[in-house]
Amino acid sequence: MHIITDETYFITTTVTDWIDVFTRPAYKDIVVDSLRYCQRNKGLKVYAWVLMTNHLHIIASATQNCTLADIMRDFKKFTAKRLLTEIANNQQESRSEWMLRRFGFAGANRKEPGSFCLWQQGYHPELLHSRDFYLQKLNYIHNNPVKQAIVAQPEHYLYSSAIDYAGGKGLLDVTIIT
């Protein structure tokens, strides 16, 4: 799907093989810091988001010269590099060899030898064409941690915009759509 500038999209980006990478705060913080950088420097406008153990959902648009496709490409490239380094160097990560082997296997078909593939190809943008569709995706995002039995209430999950919609302040700047 072609991304139209000034439009708002529901985006999903998933870790290769659905590996549960985002189980440690250090890994999750890399994603949050990168999203924050994209907001401040690339024109990413975030309306809602949730980072689960193996995927990210975000409702977003692009507001500057970058397209949403450019932002997502750069975000995924940067976070993959940082996450792979963190995984490789984390002495407390018991799964590092296994994860790096899986990401290496997934990257084996790439042009550069020794490539790793942390994120699956693409990011599956869906144009939010109506208010009802937006509300459906917003509820889906915020209820994801509840469905996974991580929290009892959406606003209790730290790596989400649900707290912003409940009147609090979350980790990212979020533009609330009412």
Image: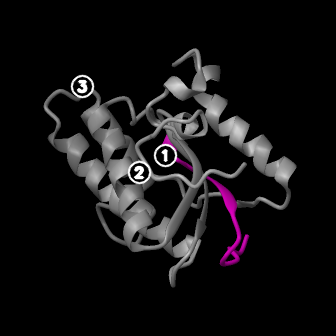
Question: 168 above or below 79?
Answer: above
Is 16 a magenta residue? Answer: yes
Residue 22 image point, x, y percent = 39, 35
Residue shown at the point (53%, 34%) measured from the top left: 163
Which residue sits furthest front? 167
Q: In the rendered image, which quarter is residue 40 located in?
A: bottom left
Total marks in image: 3
The residue lying toward the viewer, choosing from 40 and 51, is 40
Q: Secondary structure at mark 3?
A: loop
Would residue 78 be found to the left or right of residue 123 on screen? left
Return the disc, 2 or 1, that comes first in the chain's sequence.
Answer: 1
Q: CA distance from mark 3 to mark 1?
A: 18 Å
Q: Which residues are magenta?
A: 1-17
**Which residue does the numbered mark 1 point to in the structure image?**
16
Q: CA distance from mark 2 to mark 3?
A: 17 Å
Badge 2: residue crowd in 10 Å (few <14, some 14–19, many ≥20): many
Badge 3: residue crowd in 10 Å (few <14, some 14–19, many ≥20): few
**Which residue does the numbered mark 3 point to in the structure image?**
94
Residue shown at the point (26%, 35%) measured from the top left: 96
Q: Are marks 2 and 1 in contact (CB under 8 Å)?
A: yes
Q: Secondary structure at mark 1?
A: helix
Residue 58 image point, x, y percent = 58, 51
**Which residue does the numbered mark 2 point to in the structure image?**
118
Q: In the rendered image, which quarter is residue 93 located in?
A: top left
Q: In the rendered image, which quarter is residue 67 located in?
A: bottom right
